[in-house]
Structures are given as C-alpha cells and as structure tokens.
Amino acid sequence: MFGTKTRRTAARTAGTLLTAALLGGTVLTGTAQAHPALPYGTVTAPSGVYERQYPSTDSHVVGGLAYRAQVGLKCKVRAQNIDGNPVWYLLRDRQAWVAARYVANTGSVPYCNQV
C-alpha cells in the first residue's frame, strides 16, 4: 500500500490539476503556445483573475484565467477602480470582463463604443 507521504503527494497533485481545470488553465507539457491575435492580455496575478459578467467586482463570476494565461481582448472601459486602475477589458471570444489591474495588454486596446 501507499505510505502517508505518497498519499499526500497524490492528493496535492490531484488538487493542483483540479484547480487548473476549474480556472481554465492548462498543465504545461513543454510545447510552445501561440499568442492570440493582437490585442491580447497576459494574466499577471499569481493567483489568476476572475472573469466577470460586468466590469465590477459586484458582478457574477463567469470564469477564471490562470497565471500567465493569454486571452484576446476586444475593447476596454473605465469602470470600478481596482488598486488605482479603473480599466476593465472585454474578452474577444466571450461576454466576460477582467480587471486590467491583473492583466498586461499587448497591442492597442480600443475603448468600447457601447457596453
């Protein structure tokens, strides 16, 4: 049978994989990932970032992105200020918002005309 240390290691590994799956992350396999088309953002928060229904922390969480995840950005708005940063990004491929405080953008992100 397995010793206590082996069971703890297996449980910790399973927990890490489950967390990555729930946050929409991937397990690194050593293969290179292509960048999304410009503009895109890279998650800078070590704990990841929540995707919200609207650009506010009072809004429902509709998903999450893991640390260093890259995602296409459609446009931005000025909304709730998060640690001195009032910008929120609308994701390109789904109706979800992320706080710019936790996402570094690459390329020019236009302001949204209508929200």
Image (cartoon, grey):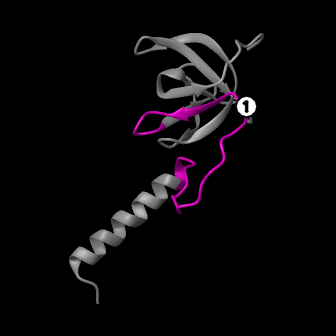
> What is the x, y in percent for residue 15?
40, 60
Q: Is residue 98 rendered to the left or right of residue 109?
A: left
Q: What element carries label 1?
A: loop
Q: Which residue is drawn at 34% across and 63% down?
A: 12
Stretch in magenta: 21-48
Does 87 appear above or below 90? above
Q: Is residue 80 rendered to the left or right of residue 9?
A: right
Does 44 appear above or below 87? below
Q: Is residue 89 visible?
A: yes
Quadrant in the picture for residue 112: top right
In the rendered image, the residue lying farthest to the right is: 113
Quadrant in the picture for residue 76: top right
Q: In this figure, what is the number of numbered marks?
A: 1
What is the chief secondary structure element of the magenta stretch?
loop
Of 32 and 102, the residue lying toward us? 32
> What is the x, y in percent for residue 113?
77, 10
Name the amino acid type tagged 1.
Arg
Q: Residue at x 58, y 25 (%)?
A: 105
Q: Is residue 35 magenta?
A: yes
Q: Is residue 54 visible?
A: no
Q: Is residue 71 rendered to the left or right of residue 65?
A: right
Quadrant in the picture for residue 96: top right
> What is the x, y in percent for residue 69?
55, 42
Locate the N terminus and report the quarter of the image it occupies: bottom left
Locate the C terminus and report the quarter of the image it occupies: top right
Q: Is residue 96 magenta?
A: no
Residue located beneath label 1 in the image: 92
Does 1 appear above or below 104? below
Q: Residue at x 53, y 22 (%)?
A: 100
In the rendered image, the residue lying farthest to the bottom is: 1
Q: Residues within 10 Å of mark 1 (few under 14, many from 20)?
A: some
Of 97 and 106, the residue lying toward us? 106
